[in-house]
Amino acid sequence: MAADIMPISPTVLRWARERAGFSLDALAGDFTKLAEWEAGDMAPTYPQLEQLADKLKLPISVFFFPEPPDVPAPEQTFRTLGAQQLQGIPPRIRLLLRKARALQLGLEELNNGASPSVRLITDDLRFSPSENINEIASAVREYLGVSIEEQLSWNNIDHALKEWRSTLQSVGVYVFKDQFRQPEYSGFCLYDPIFPIIYVNNTNSKSRQIFTLFHELAHLLFHTSGIDEKNDRYLEQLRDDNLRIEVICNQFASSFLIPDEIFESVNGSLVPDEDAAEELARRFSVSREAIFRKFLDRGEISAYQYEQAANQWSAQLQKGSGGNPYNNTIAYLGRDYITLAFRKFHQNQISYADLSDYLNTKQKHLATLEEYVARGKN
């Protein structure tokens, strides 16, 4: 019926599709008239618009804007990335980027625009792309106040991840997690002068998550947002400082978590093979891949050996079950962020609906979530 046709802007429609990372061909099977809608030759019905909004993971109200909203595109956010890498960001990662930005805004609102941390590492430490990586790693370790001896004393990888996450938050960097469903992406960060955040792929092993934390921290220290991909081929597209920053970020985590002098002292006469990687990974609370990368950087194995082992370990990683949704929420958002939101609610500073939005949890589940947080087991 004619009355059911929606008067929407073709420009907004095209912006929404491109922002979500879909080509016309990718959506043609579900929306056969999409090209005509974007050309302005036809318009969708409301049910069709609802389906499109669900597919693109956008509020349906966006489609009724007269023009595209003024929000930063990935090209503006990730300035160090090449054009091909930016164009290749899949829809799932683009959705997580939007979720991360919402969490960043949530932090700002819940904290009234002021960082809750006494110290802010991205303010206190400044580095240039020309500085020595080992010196940068040493300065960061001193600032964080975690000695290599303390790191080596942690009894398991779960303990190590919790310690590093807590340490970063104590210096103003919040860490969030989610299922990326894109194994080639390990994490990303969004720089902000007051609320910098890191977003980690929870599907990866916890040892890999630790490595990702420090890759992204390096980006934040250079006041840039970044995306951590397992494939380094995108580096070929970069030039000058952008290339140097990406190289530093790739090497910083290794230099920080596995300092050369300590690595040499414990490596000893070990043969640089998978057995040695297993042993050293446990010692440093990092992944086997990180140890093999260290072997590669030191010229002890070939690039082919590294890639073969890394691919094998990646294939061995099995996805766990969905788990308890409340425990998942606590793991993804972090206990401190959730506690902050509940505290603001109990102080009558935000509504129950606001609380639901901040925690991305339906109102009927909020009471149970608070009970899980109070148990303090995550």
Image (cartoon, rainbow, N blue to C red):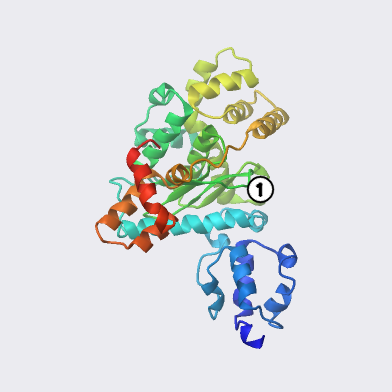
Q: Is residue 314 visible?
A: yes
Q: Quadrant of the C terminus?
A: top left
Residue at the (67%, 51%) spot, across then down: 237
Element at label 1: helix
Of 25 and 78, the residue lying toward us: 25
Residue 61 drawn above or below residue 302: below
Residue at the (37%, 62%) spot, across then down: 354
Q: Is residue 171 visible?
A: no
| Residue type (three-letter) at the residue carrying disc 1 | Tyr
Residue 184 image offset from top left, x and y in percent: 64, 44
Residue 312 drawn above or below residue 40: above
Q: Quadrant of the N terminus?
A: bottom right
Number of numbered discs on residues: 1
Determine the residue located farthest toward the left in the rendered image.
347
Residue at the (74%, 67%) spot, across then down: 28
Residue at the (52%, 29%) spot, across then down: 286
Residue 171 image offset from top left, x and y in percent: 35, 43
> How many residues crowd mark 1 within 10 Å: few (<14), some (14–19), many (20+)?
some
Left or right of residue 118, residue 287 in this image: right
Determine the residue located farthest toward the bottom in the rendered image.
2
Residue 138 image offset from top left, x and y in percent: 42, 32
Left or right of residue 280, residue 25 in this image: right
Left or right of residue 361, residue 313 in this image: right
Residue 181 image offset from top left, x and y in percent: 61, 47
Q: Which residue is mark 1?
A: 234
Residue 226 drawn above or below residue 35: above
Q: Based on the displayed image, in which of its 4 quarters is residue 362 positioned? A: bottom left
Of 133 and 81, the residue lying toward us: 81
Left or right of residue 1, residue 343 in this image: left
